[in-house]
């Protein structure tokens, strides 16, 4: 896993926790499968698609840039 990918996973988790929502709630808000969120956060999805990350960013109310910092 690259540093960029681990940052995305860490930032998703950080913003999700900041909102006080579970992975399940985030998956529903982003219209993604629960296991997609879980795998990205766990780092087992090595290269999430930009469309997926964009859906997550929108659901979290942040920009793509914020998730990738």
Image (cartoon, rainbow, N blue to C red):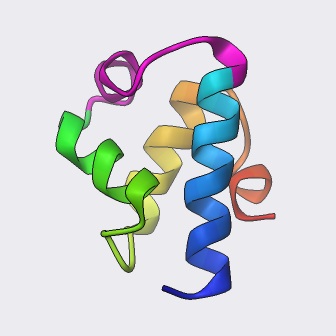
Picture layout, residue 61 above or below residue 8: above
Q: Is residue 17 above or below residue 35?
A: above
* SS majority, magenta: helix
The one of 22 and 32 positioned closer to us in this rendering: 22
Q: Which residues are magenta?
A: 18-31
Near-viewer residue (1 or 27): 1
Q: Nearer the viewer, residue 54 or 48?
A: 48
As drawn, is 24 to the left or to the right of 3?
left
Residue 6: name its quadrant: bottom right
> Is residue 27 highlighted in magenta?
yes
Residue 48, image x, y percentages:
38, 68
Residue at coordinates 61% horizontally, 61% vertically from top-left?
Answer: 8
Task: Residue at 72%, 21% (x, y): give it.
Answer: 18
**The stretch drawn in magenta includes residue 7:** no
Q: Residue at x 68, y 49 (%)?
A: 11
Left or right, 52 with reference to 60: left
Which percent across, then down, holds residue 42?
40, 57
Residue located at (59% from left, 28% from top): 16
- Residue 53: image location, x then y, percent: 48, 54
Above or below — where is 35 with respect to 42? above
């Amino acid at each position: 896993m690259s540093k960029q990918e681990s940052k995305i996973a860490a930032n998703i988790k950080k913003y999700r926790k900041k909102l006080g929502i579970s992975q399940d709630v985030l998956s529903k808000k982003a219209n993604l499968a629960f296991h997609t969120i879980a795998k990205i956060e766990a780092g087992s999805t090595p290269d999430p698609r930009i469309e997926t990350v964009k859906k997550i960013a929108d659901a979290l109310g942040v920009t793509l840039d914020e998730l990738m910092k």
